[in-house]
Amino acid sequence: MEAITTLEGFEDELESGTRVEEISRGRYVASLPEEMLSEGPLFSVVLHAVESLIGHLPLGVCWVEGVEFPISQARKPNPGKSGLSRYLGLRGPGIAATIGKGVVLHPSAHARLFKDMCDVGLNLGFDPIHLNDNEASPYLDRAHQLAEMMEIVKEEDGRRVLYFMRLPPSREDLERAVSTGIRSFYAHACWDLDRLNVVGDLMEDVFLAIRGINCLSGSSVIGTKILYELLRFSGFDMIERPVALRREELELVRELDIIIGRGEAPAMPLTSPHAHQGVAIANVPEDLIVILNGDLGIYDHPGGIMEGVKSMKEVLDSFMRGENPLSIMRRDEGVGAMVKKWGYLLP
C-alpha cells in the first residue's frame, strides 16, 4: 500500500474544522478545533478524533508520535492524588478490591461485606461490572447501604474509606447517588466512555477513577504511553495501569507511574485486578503513592477473603517499616501461604 504523498482532498474527509499540516516528509501535525474539544469529556473526544484521523491513513505504516494539549484544555484532577491520600489518611500504598466479585448480593449483604473487609484493612471498594443495573441489587439501594457503612467505619475506627460505584448512564442516578453520600465513581474504558458526559460539573465534587485500560491499550492506534498522557489530562483522580508480573515489565510500569503522577495535581495509579501480594512490593512506585487492587490475591487467598486483605495489608505495612521482604514471609503465616501459592517478584 502506498503512503500518502499529498494532502489534496484529504482534509475534506476529516471531521469539520480539523486541520492537517505536513511538517516534513511523511510527518504531519493535526490540529483539532477548540469547539470540538469542548463538546464532551476530553478523553473520549480526543480518542475518537485521533482514531478517525488514523482511519483515513494507510494501515500499518502510520502511527501517532505524541499528543499536545493547550493548558486551557487540561482538566486537572480535583482533588487528585494528594487530595485522595489526605481524604483516606494514607501515608503510603492503599488496598482496594472489587466487592462481591463474581456474585450478586443483596444491597445490605453487599455493604456488610465491604465493611468487614474495611475492618481488616481495605481502603477502597469497587462495584463489580455486572452490578451496574442489576435487579437483584438496585443501584440506588446499594448506594444508600454503602454510604451508611462508610459512616459507620468512620465512627467506629476514625478512618475514612471509599466505595467507587460504577458510573451510571444517567445524570439523575448520579445526582441521587451523590445525595446519599457516595462521592466516588469509576468508568470502565471498554463500556463507559459515553457515560462520562453525565459527570459534567460534578467532577469538582467527586472522586473519579478509570479502569479496564487494557482493552484500549491493546487496540488503540495511539500507543500505551500517549494513551496514559491523554487519561491524565482528562481529569481522572485515579488511573488503572498494568501490574508487573515479570522483571522485564517493571520498566514500563514505572514509566506509566511517572506519566500518571506528574504535574500540579497528578492522578493516583491503580494497579490492575491481577495484582496479588506476591508481587505487591514490586508494583509500589518510589513515592509510595499507589492503590493496589488485590482481587486475585484477596479472593483466592488460601485462608479466605479476610485473610487475603490482612496479608496484603501486612505486606505493605512491613514494607513501609523497612522490613526485609523475606522476613515477612517467614513470620506471617498468611503472607507465607500466598507467596507459596503465587511466588514473589523482587523489585
Image (cartoon, rainbow, N blue to C red):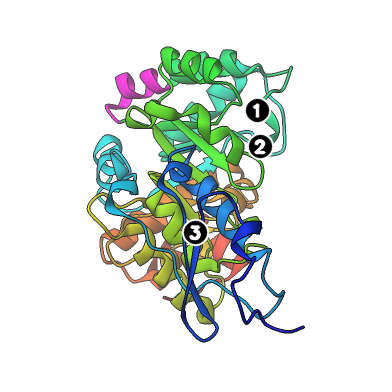
> Residue 335 has which mark?
3
Q: Three-letter amino acid code at disc 3? A: Val
Residue where numbered disc 2 is placed: 129
Q: Nearer the viewer, residue 309 or 202?
A: 202
Q: Is residue 156 magenta?
A: yes
Q: Position of residue 266 (x, y in %)?
A: 30, 52
The magenta stretch is 150-159
**Residue located 31% across and 40% down the image:** 84
C-alpha gap between disc 3 and disc 2: 29 Å
Specify few, some or many for label 2: CA neighbours under 10 Å numbering under 14, 14-19, or 20 or more.
some
Q: Which of marks 3 and 2 is in front?
A: 2
Residue where numbered disc 1 is placed: 132
Q: Position of residue 8 (x, y in %)?
A: 61, 70
- Picture layout, residue 209 above or below residue 31: above
Circle nearer the N terminus (3, 2): 2
> Residue 114 has which mark?
none
Q: Is mark 1 on a helix, strand or loop?
A: loop
User: Quadrant location of the N terminus?
Assistant: bottom right
- Picture layout, residue 226 above or below residue 150: below
- Picture layout, residue 220 above or below residue 124: below
